[in-house]
Image: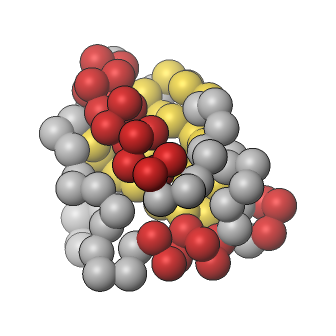
């Protein structure tokens, strides 16, 4: 079953998030990742990822946390949610 993972980083602004992407993604997109987005500004900033399965996310989470902490970011605890349907546009 697909899952969504939402992070509301307590000490990361949208600007810091954008800076972490200078030169490309901060980590290589992992197997099992369907979608990633950084959303909002200020206190409303969060990230959301869609994963093919909980196992795919669990395999990647330690790599992600190590990389972000190495860059000085504390990302907080994720909210993991079941995904019931994904609609993708045919036009990209």
Please state which of residues 40 and 66 is positioned toward the viewer in this rendering.
66
Position of the C terminus, as image quadrant, is bottom left
Q: In this view, does 90 lie to the left or right of 78?
A: left
Q: In this rendering, is residue 75 above or below 56? A: below
**58 on left or right of 17:** left
Work out whether 17 lies above or below 81.
Answer: below
- Comparing 67 with 77, the one in front is 67
Q: Residue 26: where, in percent of width, then height?
A: 34, 62
Q: Residue at x 56, y 56 (%)?
A: 72
The spot of residue 60 in percent (x, y) is 30, 33
**Based on the displayed image, in which of its 4 quarters is residue 33 positioned?**
top left
Quarter of the figure with residue 65: top left
Q: Is residue 5 left or right of residue 34?
A: right
- The image quarter containing residue 78 is top right
Seen in the picture, residue 10 relative to 3 is either above or below; the reply is below
Residue 88's spot in the image, x, y percent?
32, 55
Q: Can residue 18 be seen in this view?
A: yes
Which residue is outermost to the left?
Answer: 31
Residue at the extreme right of the image, as rendered: 43
Give the residue at x 44% y 51%.
Answer: 70
Q: How many numbered marks have been drawn onto this rendered protein structure? A: 0
> Residue drawn 23% across and 53% down?
29
Residue 87 seen anywhere in this rendered image of the structure:
no
Residue shown at 38%/32% (left/top)?
Answer: 61
Residue 32 x %, y %:
22, 36
């Amino acid at each position: 079953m697909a899952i969504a993972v939402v992070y509301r980083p307590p000490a990361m602004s949208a600007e810091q998030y954008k800076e972490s992407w200078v030169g490309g993604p901060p980590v290589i997109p992992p197997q099992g990742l369907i979608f990633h987005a950084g959303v909002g500004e200020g206190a409303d900033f969060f990230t959301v990822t869609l994963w093919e399965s909980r196992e795919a996310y669990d395999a990647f989470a330690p790599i992600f946390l190590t990389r972000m902490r190495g860059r000085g970011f504390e990302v907080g605890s994720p909210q993991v949610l079941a995904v019931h349907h994904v609609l993708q546009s045919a036009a990209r």
